Image (tube, rainbow, N blue to C red):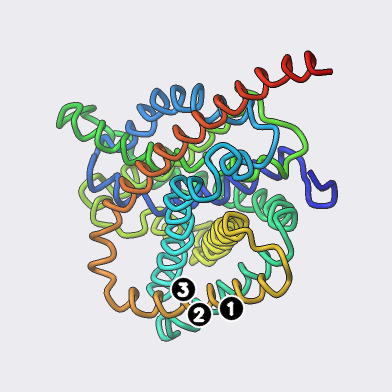
Amino acid sequence: MNSKSSFGRLPAVFMLILSVGLVNHVLIVPVILNVAGRDSWLSPLLTCLIGILWISFPLYGTLKRLKEPFWTMVERKLGRAGAWLIKLPMLIILLGIAFTALIDSISWSQTTYLPYTPSYALALALLGVSLFAVKKGLRTIAFTSGILLPFVVILGDFVMSANMPHKDYDYLKPFLENGYSPVVSGALLAACSMVEIFVLVLYQHHIKKKFTYWQLILLMFILVLLSMGPLMGAIVQFGPTEATKMRYPAYSQWRLVQIGKYVEHLDFFAIYQWLSGSMVRIALSLYLVKELLGVRKPKGMAVYGWVTLAVLTVLAQIVTNHMISYRALMSVYFYVSGALILIVSLAGWLAAVLSLRDRTERIPVLKEEG
């Protein structure tokens, strides 16, 4: 571990909350509402049961056994060619994380406050900032998250409190009006976003101390609350029927905020919240792609940056012209990405267990030879 690039557990958590929090708090909310309707707020609670099992074995089991960077361990165990059996799905996941965050940020910006700005201009701006952060390193991204997140949380608490007069909790009843099936379907979707916590394994070698089991459980509950809040808020403020029709329920709650008779239209604060999460999410995923590909030298970083900027900008321009098809694919995307992360986490856990076993068996042999 390089002391100049390492950081503590708190900045690591802030970075993860901003990254995974964007999908839990914003991107996946309309998908869960569409699947589970009135009972969608129960889905994150059910996810806790799945999350505890997953954290207890693949995630914590891998983290506590790692004595080196994750990809170093995988290559040592499977060889450089064999390591791509795990690297390739993870590469697809990380690029998918960056691309979906980019597309949704562009679409939301054009829908709300920049309707006449071309997609490529927004893509260049957001990717430019994110790639600059990638160039500066993960420590910079982590400490930037530590500055951004407190204000994101304060604004979130503000909008929740300011909208209390608009909330009618009777909209939550009757519970389970369509049975358990919609809630379970919503829980599976919520779980697919929750397993993104696995990226902790990919940058644990930059963190000064390892996470304990209970710290990971606490992190999971924080992310569950980040999903539950906007789901419940959308239902109690707009009703279940109207909430399921919304593309951006979390943003719509900002448009209701009013202070007294004369202060309203405070939804510009949502721009800060969204772009903070989006920038960190894109920067973190692109940094992890850089590490996965083994890009280290300045010349390689320059090539990686320009190629990434060009390819993602062109793709963003194409996809934003076909947003109806993109939105139809989003629910499928969450299932696919969740399944891939689950497979990678199980494979990584198995590799970590076997790697530690090899080390413990090698030590007595070395002692005998000595």
Report the number of discs.
3
- Where the C terminus falls, by quadrant? top right
Q: Position of residue 105 (x, y in %)?
A: 45, 67
What crowding class fits label 3: few (fewer than 14 Cα within 10 Å), some (14-19), or many (20 or more)?
many
Q: Position of residue 95 (x, y in %)?
A: 46, 60
Q: Position of residue 180 (x, y in %)?
A: 20, 27
Whether the residues at callouts 2 and 3 have beta carbons within 8 Å, the answer is yes
**Could you tell me the amino acid type at mark 2?**
Ala
* Mark 2, residue position: 310
3 left or right, relative to 134: right
Helix, strand or loop for disc 1: helix
**Could you tell me the amino acid type at mark 1?**
Trp
* Mark 3, residue position: 312
Residue at mark 1 to residue at mark 2: CA–CA distance: 6 Å
Helix, strand or loop for disc 2: helix
137 left or right, relative to 184: right
Report whether residue 167 is seen. no
Tell me which residue sits at (26%, 59%) in the image: 329
In the displayed structure, would residue 188 be above or below residue 21? above
Q: Which mark is residue 83?
A: none
What crowding class fits label 2: few (fewer than 14 Cα within 10 Å), some (14-19), or many (20 or more)?
some
Earlier sequence position, callout 3 versus callout 1: 1
In the displayed structure, would residue 8 be above or below residue 181? below
Helix, strand or loop for disc 3: helix
Tell me which residue sits at (42%, 50%) in the image: 89
Q: Which mark is residue 306?
A: 1
Whether the residues at callouts 1 and 2 have beta carbons within 8 Å, the answer is yes
Report whether residue 144 is seen. yes
What crowding class fits label 1: few (fewer than 14 Cα within 10 Å), some (14-19), or many (20 or more)?
few
Tell me which residue sits at (46%, 57%) in the image: 254
**Could you tell me the amino acid type at mark 3?**
Leu
